[in-house]
Image: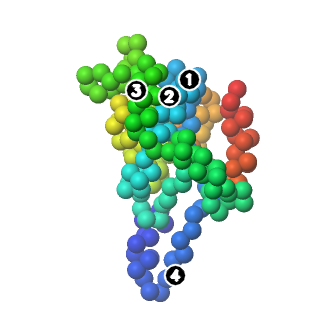
Amino acid sequence: TPTDYYSKLKENSDVKVVDSSGASVDYAEFNMKNPLFADKSVRKALIMAISKKHMKSYLSKADSTTSCFVQKKSLNYSKDAEDYYNEHYGYNKKEAEKLLKAAGWKKNDKGILEKNGKTFTFTMKTSDADNVKKSIQAIQADWKDIGVNMKIEAKGWSYVNQDVEKGKFACARMGLEWSEPFLLLDIFMSRSN
């Protein structure tokens, strides 16, 4: 991928590299029909357990992370929206653990969350692109740290998308290339039923 050559291109005096963020967004889509994700506080805990700083250590210098769907280069960017997201959903491992405990999840002797005899174990489906797999591995490590046993199934993006559309997934890494967040509403609203 082009990001693999970032450092070499940056060092080349014959090439001018301009850093900018792309008009895309990656997100975790939870299947709310799956009992693991039915509780909103559990989903919030999972989001709060993802460290952007940790994720950056898995990515190349050309890849970046953002706080929310509304990116700084978007027409409708709002510092207030980004601040709201960071305040309510930003990285906070202790709060994530507190939410999971309140939802009845407790770590077993192997360090995996358990509730009513079932462990918090699931597979996240993701595309097989290297940079995407790296970001999912970062999430896997963050979630393992709070007791979530997430496995990764990497395959072509179109197959991941088909599984999501058919409801054959627990969690999936999805990605869209739209710069304006309101364009995403159609996708999310069509999957909400």
Residue at x 62%, y 29% (from the top left corner): 166
User: Looking at the picture, which amino acid does disc 2 mark?
Assistant: Val
Q: Nearer the viewer, mark 3 or mark 2?
A: 2
Which residue is disc 4 drawn over? 16
Residue 82 badge: none
Dot 4, crowdedness within 10 Å: few (<14), some or many (≥20)?
Answer: few
Please identify the quarter of the rendering in which residue 12 is found. bottom left
Residue 137 is situated, as x and y percent measured from the top left of the image, at 39, 45
Residue 156 is situated, as x and y percent measured from the top left of the image, at 52, 45
- Dot 3 or dot 1, earlier in sequence: 1
Q: Nearer the viewer, mark 3 or mark 1?
A: 1
* SS under mark 3: strand
Between 134 and 180, which is closer to the camera in this rendering? 180
Between 175 and 92, which is closer to the camera in this rendering? 92
Which residue is disc 3 drawn over? 121
Which residue is disc 1 drawn over? 38
Task: Give the CA separation, mark 3 to mark 1.
Answer: 14 Å
Q: Are marks 1 and 2 in contact (CB under 8 Å)?
A: yes
Between 1 and 111, which is closer to the camera in this rendering? 111
